Structure formats: C-alpha cells, structure tokens
Image (cartoon, helix red, strand yellow):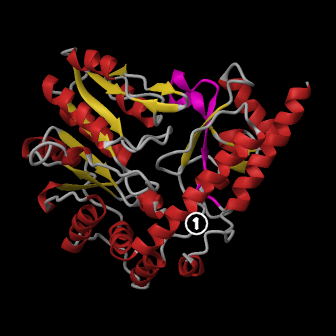
Amino acid sequence: MTNRKILFDFDKIIPRQGTGSRKWDALENVFGSNDVLPLWIADMDFSSPKAVSTAIIERANHPIYAYNTQEKSIYQSVIEWAKKRHGWEIEEEWILLAPGVVPSISLSIFALSEPGDGIIIQPPVYPPFFASIKDNDRKVIENPLLSKNGRYEIDFEDLEQKLAEPNNKLLLLCSPHNPVGRVWSREELKKVYELCQKYEVDVLADEIHNDLVFQGHKHTVFASLGTPVCKQSVTFMAASKTFNVAGLNFSFIIVPCKRRRGLIQNWITKLHISRNNVFGGIGTEAAYRDGEAWLDALLIYLEKNADTLVDFIQTRLPEVKVSKPEGTYLVWLDFRAYFTNDKELQKFLVQTAKVGLNAGRNFGTQGEGFARINIATQRSVLLEALTRIENALLNYKKI
C-alpha cells in the first residue's frame, strides 16, 4: 500500500476551473451561484492513469486528426479486461461501439421496443433512465427499491407483477446501482434473470460502474447468468467511470444475441453515429491495458473516503442517515429529518452550506428529501464539504 501511495497521489489537488469542466465551470448554470463546492456530477477530481495521457499525447503529436478506424486491439483489450476483472468471456462480434452509455440505452430502447411500450426501472435511479424512456415515447414503469434500514433491496413481488404485464417489454437495470450504491449479489441477479426469462422481458444492463466495487462485494455481469450466456440481455460498459475518461465519449454495447445486435446496429447506422472520437479508442485501450494498478489504488482511496464520510455523519450528524455504498463513488444521503421537500433541501445546501450536490428528487419521487454526494475527490475537499454541511445544520437547528 505504501508503494501505491507514492505512485498514485490521490490527495493532490488538481485545479479544474477554466478547463471546460462541467463539474467546476458550470456552477452558475446548475446551482445559480459560483460560490459552492461541487460534489455532484459523476466524474472524479483525480488524474487519469498516466498511460492514458501518454497514449493520447503521442497520438496528438501527429498533426492530422481525420477520419479514423478502430483497431482490433481495442476490441481485444475490452475482451481481456472483461475476462480478467469479471470472469466474463465475450466475443469480438458481440461488441458495438457507441459515443456513450446514455445514447446506447436510447438506441437499444428504439431497437427492442415500440412507442407506447412499458420500460421498467427501479427508482431512485439515474435520472437519464427516465428521460431515455419518456423522450422516446415509451412509458416509465416503476419497480421502486425497498429501503430496509437504509439498505436498498429489489421488491421482487412487485417486479414480477410488472414483468407479467404484456405491454412491459424491457427492464432497464442499473448494476451497480446509482445512486444507492448497491452491488447486486449474484443471488439477487439470478432471481431477476429467472423472472425475466419467465415473462420474456429483455434486460438492458447499465454496468458502467462495474469496476468500482469495494471489499467484500463482487460485481456479477448480468449477461453471464444462464447457460452459457443470457441472450435476452444488452450490456452497457465503458472505461469512463473507472478511469475518469468520460470526456472521450467512447463506450461499448455488448449483445450476445445476433438478432438483437442487428436491430441495435441498424439504429446506429440510421443515426450515422458509427464513427468515434479518434482519441476515445486510444485512451480506452491504454486504460484497460495499463491502468489496473492505478484502479486498485483508487479503490483503496475511494473506500477510505466512503468510510470517512459515514463515520463523520454517524458521529457528528446522526440525524442525517447514510449507508456505506458497496460500490460506485456516489453516496445517498437522507436529510428527511430536517427537510420536508427537495426544494427546501437544495436551497439550504446551495445558499447556506454552499455545497453543490445532486438533488434527490431528480432520481424519482423516492428521492424527495435526499441528496447524492460524489466522494471521488481529495479527502480534504470531502471533509471541507461535510464540515460546511455540519456548520450549516447547526445554525439551521437554532432557527
């Protein structure tokens, strides 16, 4: 661990203002004030692995940035990473390239359902899930998660009822789950798999956080269930969350079923989005090839941040409820002991505490009175944000 700390200094502050960072440079638009400490949008305040910047700079030194092709080595790096980190054996022909996971979800909804069909989601959940359904003239069907002492579980009885409805065609699964931080166990996912097989509902599995799992937990690729692989599934993956390269706009849609793959490819062709950023593939391949040691060190740092946050809140802000996430670098905070609605909470956080968090209501009605905090930052920054919230709540309670 000592050597890792020397090699990867996650405590180092890296100024991001003025770099076009949405997290840091769009505060006025997002929060109505530049005077907030931002711990919201899901990117990290850490440098990506050195191998990534080295590979991109090397390519950038060639002065022509024209149309590019995708080398077979990019696909091979994805195949090797999936096998090594997740024990999932995939084939090159299963992999489609796309500019991001959210566009990939929309493409798949287009391809595998019809206008008016129901798409099941499990809120509180990543806000674009709602938009990708509504914007494409499908119906949002909610299978809300159950909170048991702050730990969320799937409501399987309700899920089966929703799956049994013939107009509900797809389940949009968030695994690991954003924002509640659950890493679904193999047993839980197996139950989801069996129900979806029973009612012939396809699963769109957003697994973008699959590499960000803490000790004692293991990510199970949904498509790896079944024998030999679940063909009623589409898996979305990317290096973006793992290695902090979301700006490269490069992701993968992994589809074992030839028919389903063809339907999705057809929409990629129709929308003319088959070309990818010249640097996206280069950076992604470098990350998968040479970023593993960096990731292992990152996970240690992130889990320490999670422990720091939970200890701070339980010790100094016991009326704010929190459960340690099992994965991701996002934590779901329950402020309902103080605030009756989301608008009041956001006004307090921005104007009084001067901290920018994600509004819980954006994750569904179940998020009223909650906020999502991003802990992928330097520990000193995280502690500053928590101290601001603590001081503001102390003053708030006196009113």
On-image quarter of the N terminus: bottom right
Percent across and percent down for residue 293 are 43, 74
Q: Residue at x 20, y 26 (%)?
A: 195
Could one spot residue 36 in this view of the protein? no
Mark 1 neighbour density, 10 Å: few (under 14) some (14–19) many (20 or more) = some
Near-viewer residue (147 or 268): 147
* Magenta segment includes 207: no
Q: Which residues are magenta?
A: 359-377
Percent across and percent down for residue 8 are 56, 76
Could one spot residue 249 in this view of the protein? yes
Q: Quadrant of residue 186?
A: top left
Query: Circle 1 sits on which residue?
Result: 46
**Location of residue 181 with respect to 301 vertically, above or below:** above
Percent across and percent down for residue 256 are 13, 49
Disc 1 secondary structure class: loop
**Is residue 216 found left or right of 3 in the rendered image?**
left
On-image quarter of the C terminus: top right
Near-viewer residue (85 or 265): 85
**Location of residue 176 with respect to 144 vertically, above or below:** below
